[in-house]
Amino acid sequence: MWIEPLYPILDPGTLENLVASSLTSPINDTIHPVQAAKQNMKMASFYLVMALGAINIKNFFKQSQVRSNQGLFQNPSASRRSAADLYGEAIKCMDISTQHHVPSILFIQILLLISIYSLHGPVASSQWQLAGSAMRMAIEIGLHNSSTASGFSEAATDQRNRVFWSAYAIEISLAYNLGRPPSIGEEHITAEIPRISSTTLSSILHIKHRQIQSRVISQVYRVNNKVRSLTEAQDMIAQLQEELDQWKSMIPDPRQPNEDSPYPYSFWVRLYNGTSLVLHRSSPLCPNPSRESLGICLKSAGAYIDNILELLRESNVPLSWMLVQGVMFAGLTMLITARTGFKQLDPRVGLLSLLVDLPAWTRKCSVCLAIMDERWHEDLLPKLNSQFEVLVNDTLQLISSAITSPRDVDVLGEVSVPWPSEMTAPTLGLDDCSFEGAHLPDSGFPGPWYDFELMRDIMGFDPAQTFWDTFPPE
């Protein structure tokens, strides 16, 4: 089952029941409307699972053949139904008995399945609303509170936990990427994480990672972040980094011969690097990152792009705007961090990173966008790539000019860029990534420094929302 590794929405027994229900006789008029609505919802779940499988089946067969080095798997592309067709059948089943839908585990499961399905489209308000509705229903029927599960069987309690933590993981992922607060804080959650089994190991690791991201949202990126001293802010970042490092140590070792994880080691490392770069960049908690944080941010962003490029070259991973978002964010984070913080980088490693690593990473970012454009044929991708290249060229020119000027580099290699007396070295807040508020040299662009409305359009944001507040990658 494709959704099982990360989201334990349906256990194998529930999936078998869905298949059995799909093989029963059609619903007739003699069945009570409430019972008919329940049966239609089960059919909707079945079609949604099939739709998710249809989206990923091409990659499954290709990867299976690569792993086995044999042609044991035959791709039944000629006979299968499309994902859109199966999704349409699911929506039809939902529409038949709309008036009988009430908050329930089955209804929440359907909303979560639809939300996962929509990951392959633009990240717009509909997906956010779906995940939020699912979480609010889960809270309404008490799935977040372990005390409300008293009296349920062990299997029923496990199902409640599975559904709640699936909703939690999906909503935190969206909140983290869209820069919005989640529906519930950790202090209100007492539900137990699903039982450890061969089918839940990956989902538990995934949930624990989302818990860390939730803390990043609440501690680093909250709007009303109280004023803290620089030491307190750096201590908080160090604590979260320690939690992230401990989580990384839980990732199954790929060198173990008996380890057969549904997701490769590189997937978990990508999550690690994506979160690390967000933690160490300029944020409301720490607008001026330390020298160490700047270095970690650059290296994590570069490692993230290296990971994505390897993924694109070695597999036919299903493409989505979320993946595009991650690549663009990592690339832009590198440019912004390098442009506004290169004077603070460690002089022993800073020059190497700026002159060698940064150009290589930005070039790889462009290659990622080019590969996705070749496979996906979306009109916005070449525009994004060309505009990203303009930013890359201007940033590299600025940095190289400052570094190579003899009067600006001392014997130890530290860079000292001369800014006119009426100007200060550029700083960039999270809500100011258009560069309009930063004192930067003339770039030759017509009008303001740059207009990122295209990036807002691609992700489906409301123009009134602050696009760049947290916008971190997966």
Image: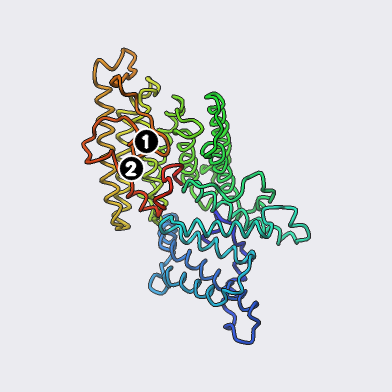
Residue 463 x/y as whole percent? 39, 51
Name the residue at 46% across, 72% down: 88
> Does 414 sit above or below residue 376?
above
The image quadrant of residue 396 is: top left
Residue 365 numbered tag: 2
Q: Looking at numbered disc 2 in the image, what kind of residue is underneath it?
A: Cys
Identify the residue at the far right of this view. Answer: 151
Q: Nearer the viewer, residue 101 or 202?
A: 101
Q: Looking at numbered disc 1 in the image, what kind of residue is underneath it?
A: Met
Question: Gap in Å between the C-alphas at discs 2 and 1?
Answer: 10 Å
Label 2 crowd bin: few (<14), some (14–19), many (20+), radius 10 Å: many
Residue behind mark 1: 334
What secondary structure is found at the residue carrying circle 2? helix
Identify the residue at the far top of this view. Answer: 411
Residue 441 x/y as whole percent? 26, 30
The image quadrant of residue 404 is: top left
- In this picture the colour scheme is rainbow
Name the residue at 69% across, 57% down: 142
> Does 71 sit above or below residue 419?
below
What secondary structure is found at the residue carrying circle 1? helix
Q: Are marks 2 and 1 in contact (CB under 8 Å)?
A: yes
Name the residue at 48% across, 64% down: 52
Residue 356 numbered tag: none
Q: Nearer the viewer, residue 331 or 462?
A: 462
Specify which label sits upstream in the sequence, 2 or 1.
Answer: 1
> Does 235 sit above or below residue 307?
above
Label 1 crowd bin: few (<14), some (14–19), many (20+), radius 10 Å: many
- Total numbered circles: 2
Residue 44 x/y as whole percent? 54, 71
